[in-house]
Amino acid sequence: MNLVSLSAILLYIAAALSRFFKIGSLNRKHMLLLLGGIAVSLHAVVLYQNILTPLGLNLGFFNAGSLISWMIVLLLLLSLIRQPVENLAFILFILAAMMIVLEASFHTERIVSVAQDFGVRLHILFSIIAYSLLSISALQAVFLALQDYQLHHKHPAWVMQRLPPLQVMEKLLFQMIALGFVLLTFSLLSGLIFLEDIFVQHKVHKTVLSLIAWSVFATLLWGHWRYGWRGKTAIRWNISGFVILMFAYFGSKLVLELILQR
């Protein structure tokens, strides 16, 4: 592990803990943005060093996981400028730090040629951003479930005291799901158009699971619009869709690269 990786890890941890203290005139949100911004910049350098190779982009299992965790943190920091999502930072920053450790500790290789056409690269970009947004929405749903539970059982612990109102949380949740769903749609469409081997044996389960996840999120958004689905119903559908999408994105890479070593 080099100095840049170690610095990024320590800054992620410091950013995660910054919500519990205040330094000088900087409030907790400003500390989060400052430390998180430096950490995500150093993380980008780590990704550049590990993913860019003479043969193309190495999107092996741990490299891909680190890349997605970086995108999640970047999107979180951008959202934090306007939205009250500070409570998601603790878990997501620690996750990003862990992915850098794993990326440095285990080498996996899956080379994607940079010579591939624009459509393929667009598909990869849509996929990474869609998964990142829907990951944040899944974590948001977990916090929403905890908030709802404490509200109905009338013992507001520290989580209730630090989270935005329930209506604000639900609004943020559906905004992230809707945007993630749009990008997931673009990902699937670009894959169907530009990838010739999307239904070959070692990729068909990824395609099918992605389509099932898309259907789950589509049903959730339609139910919210048509029937006003919210609360526990929305949380169940959202987390179910994310779990299916997680298996689609990482299930095949786990089996092929770490188990079958293909």
Image: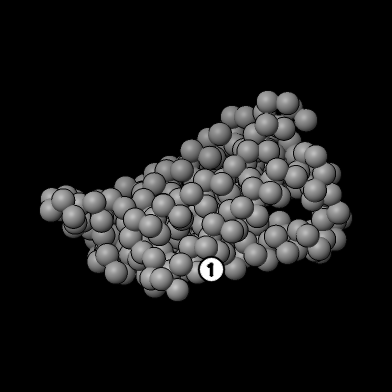
Give percent across and percent down for residue 21: 24, 52
Q: Residue furthest front?
A: 227
> Residue at the location (19% across, 56% down)?
151
Q: Quarter of the image holding residue 192?
A: bottom right
Left or right of 168 in this view: 257: right
Identity of the residue drawn at 42% across and 43% down? 94
User: How packed is label 1: few (under 14 Cα within 10 Å), some, or many (20 or more)?
Assistant: some
Looking at the rendered structure, the number of numbered marks drawn on it comes to 1
User: By what rule are the colours in the image chosen?
Assistant: one colour
Name the one closer to the observer, 73 or 7.
73
Looking at the image, which is closer to me, 135 or 107?
135
Residue 162 location in percent, x, y? 23, 58
Q: Quadrant of residue 205?
A: top right
Give the residue drawn at x 32%, y 47%: 17
Q: Is residue 150 left or right of residue 138?
A: left
Q: Is residue 98 something one can see in this rendering? A: yes
Give the position of the N terminus as an image quadrant: top right
The secondary element bearing badge 1 is classed as: helix
**Residue 149: x and y, percent?**
24, 51
- What x and y, as percent, mark residue 179? 53, 68
Reply above or below: 243 against 84: above
| Residue 49 can be seen, yes or no | no
Choose top left, top right, bottom left or bottom right for residue 54: top right
Apparent side of residue 234 relative to residue 241 in the rendered image (left or right): left
For badge 1, the amino acid type reads Leu
Residue identified by numbered label 1 = 179
Q: Is residue 35 above or below residue 224?
A: above
Left or right of 126 on screen, residue 28: left
Against 141, is 178 above or below? below
What residue sits 78% from the left and 30% below the top? 262
* Residue at the far left in the pictured view: 154
